[in-house]
Image (cartoon, rainbow, N blue to C red):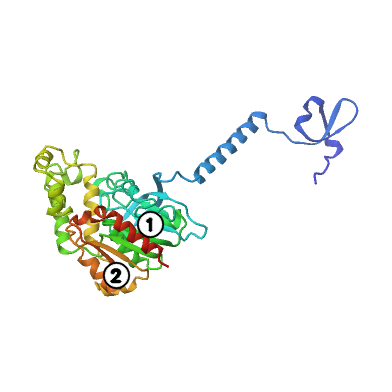
Amino acid sequence: MIRPIPLARRSTIPASDALTAAMFLPEGNGKITVRRRIKMPSTMKILRVVAAIVLLIAAASAQSAPAEEGAQQFARIGDLKLQNGQVIRDCRIGYRTFGHLNDDKSNAVLFPTWFGGRSQDLMANIGPGKIVDSSKYYVILVDALGDGVSSSPSNSSAQPRMQFPRFSIRDMVESQHELLMRVLHLTHVYAVMGISMGGMQTFQWVVAYPDFMDRAIPIVGSPRLAPFDLLLWQTMIDAVEQNSLWKDGNYTQQPVPREVDQISQLALSTPEHYNQEMTREKFFASLKTPPDTHFDTNDRIRQAQAMMGLDVSAPFGGSMQRAAEAVKAPMLIIVDAHDHMVTPGPALEFAKLKSAETFVLENDCGHLGPGCDMQKVSAAVAEFLAKK
């Protein structure tokens, strides 16, 4: 309650100024006696305040509005401490979502990228009749560290080029865990799956966070690269670092020699498949084509190093038996019998230790096997995901 001002302090103002008074009493003489005078804000000030409020509401609405399905999105998860003690500063994770999360948040499927791939490259695998049906599942495609979309040597201003710390497959998983927990507010997913390096991340997920998923599907992945695989990836790294354009990562032109692509082609499929797809004329013409440089060389090396360092048994003293015993989720492990890029032995050994379901492709496509037998793979994945 506002107390009246004592009579001795009363003042009078013209009636035309009455808008400035909060409490007034007419006295019949054309003037107003003010008991408490409160200066009202000007019209311009009011309009400025209203405009500011409208802008804040609009900004909040824009932030809360759901992104268009499949649109590239980014999450900043702060500084990410790595397994080696180093830190990725202001770590950014790219991702895309498809489908709808159900009411109890039980239909989410995490799908990280392969070596050199981006979430955009995975989009063709999502939808009815494909590897993951987005009409049934809420699919989250995640750009792995070092792919040029998420934090990478090629896009970090704080840690550019080879100043960007060396990271591991486990670090990729940790960044994705942060995305799910802190940004998407998911404490559990229905399934984790991935192809090639995405399959390696899947193996790491089931060992590092065994209670986080109900299903896991590594496709032509590995829990630990075999010696032949290590030879392949180290040879490609050596080919880059011996190039005169390399300059310890401070290049001005991508130092990707033709040998890198040729080594990759030797391991990517099989002689039978390569000879079916390639003619002598196409081969000689390819020698005149510049090597593919879409994948930044520093990014390439950091991701290759991450794959080479993968060993899900490391926390268990090198015992793959103990690592497999730590896994709680049922697994469908898909390999190609003739894969020379990520040889199937370690994955099949893990499947045996885990008593996991396996699906062995017998085509002549090698590491490209899932693409060659996409219909079979999609059917096997759909059946496995539908199991109760």
* Camera sees residue 82: no
User: Which residue is found at the position 82% from the left and 26% from the top?
Assistant: 15
Image location (x, y in percent) of residue 273 = 15, 52
Q: Nearer the viewer, residue 100 or 38?
A: 100
| Image position, residue 213 (x, y; %) | 40, 64
Horizontal side, residue 28 vs residue 332: left or right: right
Residue 342, given in percent of the width and then of the height, sits at 20, 59
Based on the displayed image, in which of its 4 quarters is residue 367 positioned? bottom left
Return the residue found at the far right. Answer: 28
Q: Rate crowding at label 1 as few (under 14), some (14 to 19) or many (20 or more) other CA atoms within 10 Å.
A: many
Provide the residue designation for mark 2: 315
Residue 287 x, y percent position in the rendering: 10, 40
Side of 299 relative to 46 (left or right): left
Relative to the observer, which residue lies in front, 222 or 8?
222
Q: Using the numbered discs, state the Cα–Cα distance from disc 1 to disc 2 in whole angstroms.
A: 24 Å
**Image height check: is 46 above or below 176?**
above
Residues 227 and 123: in front is 123
Q: Quadrant of residue 308?
A: bottom left
Judged by depth in the image, the label closer to the viewer, 1 or 2, is 1
Q: Residue at x 19, y 55 (%)?
A: 365
Q: Which residue is mark 1?
A: 110
Identify the element where label 2 is drawn: helix
Amino acid under label 1?
Answer: Leu
Question: Mark 2 or mark 1, which is nearer the start of the sequence?
Answer: 1
Report crowding for label 2: few under 14, some 14 to 19, many 20 or more residues within 10 A (C-alpha).
few
Helix, strand or loop at disc 1? strand
Q: Amino acid at mark 2?
A: Pro
Residue 139 in sight from this viewpoint: yes
